[in-house]
Amino acid sequence: LASRAFKEEGTIVKIGDLELGGSEIQVMAGPCAVESREQLLESARLVKAAGATMLRGGAFKPRTSPYSFQGLEEEGLKLLAEARDLTGLKIVTEVMDASTIPMVAEYADVLQIGTRNMQNFFLLREVAKVNKPVILKRGVSATIEEWLMAAEYIMAGGNYNVILCERGIRTYETFTRNTLDLSAVPVIKHLSHLPVIVDPSHAIGKWRFVAPMAAAAVAAGADGLLIEVHPNPAEALCDGPQSLTPSNFEALMKELNGVAGVF
Ligand code: PEP
Ligand code: MN
């Protein structure tokens, strides 16, 4: 179902009035985690002002350490919904566990499956039953074939609105958090009709390198970007080092207009 051989023309995933996979590049931006009302509403306001169309933010966080901030859960989802009401931005947030799908789906416009759950086949089968688009992040050590098979699980279960997200894979390089596999963008476009977006923030892990790789992703043919932005990255409870400041995000959005215009 995910293959280009099965369906020749590219799929456009509709998110309300937005189209992902069409002629416009959609930018989803916001903090790694929803931390507080002030932090989230400020993030929403600033990413909207800079030109983003969707707000990201985790309410359930898959943290490496059990002692790290785990997210505000339903309280965070409510804040995301409030931010949508105030700004009109569409909401993207991660669902980590099948038991919380109904709750997350009640608030979110798009469900995100994180890299650590790409091959959680039970979870994939369950999100397949939800009538909302799903962003499927590439597993940290998944091949393109495995990633497409994970998308196939969601589609086989009846949900065709799958958006693939390249977010970096683990290699021997340690200077960056992961290695952004930009070649995945044209390869996915060749193998599949599904839209593909790029998350340079988690791929690189250092804010300084996010903007050039975001521009490169657009040049490579990505249909959208997922970018971490925080009103004050130094105080972030999660992923501060890779989060753009408001002014860096604004600069990136201006630069992208140029890149998108060229390609
Ligand atoms: C995220 O987008 O907040 C996230 C946890 O990403 P990933 O699953 O790619 O690590
Ligand atoms: Mn993050």
Image: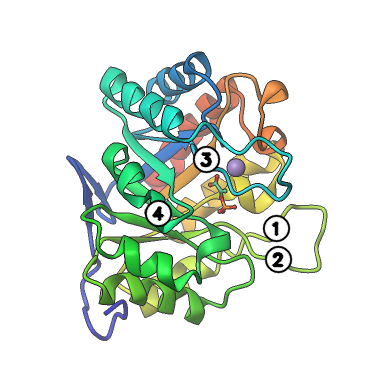
Q: Is residue 63 left or right of residue 135?
A: right
Find residue 99 and name its label. Answer: 4
> Residue under circle 2?
170
* Callout 1 crowding tier (Cα within 10 Å): few <14, some 14–19, many ≥20: many
167 vs 186: above or below: above
* Callout 4: SS: helix
Q: Position of residue 186 (x, y in %)?
A: 45, 70
* Callout 1: SS: loop
Res. 107 in view: yes
- Earlier in the chain: of badge 2 and badge 4, it is 4
Find residue 221 and name its label. Answer: none
> Residue under circle 1?
178
Mark 1 or 4, which is nearer the eye? 4
Residue nearest the viewer, comparing 211 with 36: 36
> Residue under circle 3?
227
* Callout 4 crowding tier (Cα within 10 Å): few <14, some 14–19, many ≥20: few
What's the residue type where badge 3 is placed? Ile
The outermost residue toward the top is: 38
